[in-house]
Image: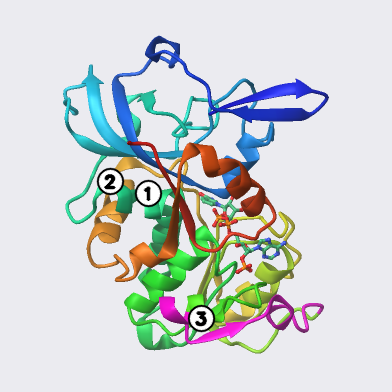
Amino acid sequence: MVVEEIGDKRFSRTITEKTIDQLPDGEVLIKVSWSSLNYKDALSASGNRGVTRKYPHTPGIDASGVVEESRSDAFHPGDKVIVTSYDLGMNTSGGFAQYIRVPAAWVVPLPAGLDLRESMIFGTAGFTAGMSVMALIHSVPVDRGDVLVTGATGGVGSLSVAILAGLGYSVTAVSGKTTAESFLKKLGARKIISRSEATAGHERPLLKGLWAGVIDTVGGEILASAIKSTDLQGVVTCCGNVASPELSLTVFPFILRGVSLVGIDSQNCPMEYRRKVWQHLASDWKPALLNDLCREVTLDDLDSEIELILRGAQTGRIIVRMES
Ligand SMILES: NC(=O)c1ccc[n+]([C@@H]2O[C@H](COP(=O)([O-])OP(=O)(O)OC[C@H]3O[C@@H](n4cnc5c(N)ncnc54)[C@H](OP(=O)(O)O)[C@@H]3O)[C@@H](O)[C@H]2O)c1
């Protein structure tokens, strides 16, 4: 898929034939089997220069596939691998293509317990959910109380709900979709609340301490209200800004309740920690219903899926079949 600027801030998306030598230099050439759609891909695919500076460009921040050529001793032809994060699909030709060529330092061997398709049901969204869960469970034991997940039907949100519920946490999900209840209950959410319930009383500096922990994927007023509603020693993780990048707060949740706010940056996560998160995703954190969390599409179908995710209207994960 090539995204090109065709006029004043107007961009086109076409499926085009290119040759391997048009790919950027890198130690590992990978034949892509699967990719996936993340919110960031939709931004890159629609000309957002905060994500992608130069066009024409091939988006796709996620890819899984098989090594075809390698100049690195760490990888050999035939190895099954995952590439997410770093610069893939941002300013490096990405996973919405049959091949990627990347530095060896970006490549993760497919962990035992996952196949290539499953690894893309997780993709960057699931990896980010994994990093958020890791930060939360470090300080919040299962019996401490309810955990809130915002943007719950989205990629990061739905996988966070499923992983936390699988670990035995009592999860309350915030969703703007009135039809989300059966999907979220199936993933293991105990309770579903609306965005307006999640922000009730938001003008006050502190609210009743309801949550032992929070995984926030949306930012803005929902995140601010979640922090104000977090109980003593609670942990709140923050990874996204689909609602807003603003955060309007006082210091009171931090100095009167010992609440911690943990930033989640999957893009620059160090490789050792990255492999640890993938190991958990492939084993003790792998949701039983992983396959129910996704819809499968091809490159030809991606246009309408991109428009849906930009409107916040996707549910779960979209995976892209690249192999025939
Ligand atoms: N920091 C990192 O490393 C990292 C990694 C991955 C993703 N992210 C960020 O995390 C966020 C979520 O990514 P994603 O791939 O999960 O996106 P997604 O699949 O589009 O999910 C976002 C969800 O947020 C909710 N939402 C959408 N618009 C909203 C609004 N205006 N107000 C409140 N809620 C809204 C919707 O869920 P409901 O309808 O259920 O409310 C939507 O499904 C994005 O901002 C993305 O850039 C960050």
Please state which amino acid type lies under the numbered disc 3: Ser
Left or right of residue 103: residue 91? right
Residue placed most toward the observer, 154 or 243: 154
Label 3 and label 1: CA atoms lie apart by 23 Å
The label number, if any, that marks residue 116 in the structure image = 2
Residue 120 higher or lower than 184, as above or below = above
Horizontal and vertical percent for residue 315?
55, 63
Q: Which residue is mark 3?
A: 182
Marks 3, 1: nearer the viewer = 3
Q: Residue at x 24, y 28 (%)?
A: 67
Secondary structure at badge 2 equals: helix
Horizontal and vertical percent for residue 35?
41, 41
Mark 1 near mark 2, Cβ–Cβ under 8 Å?
yes
**What is the magenta range?**
185-203
Is residue 246 magenta-colored? no
Residue placed most toward the observer, 272 or 254: 272
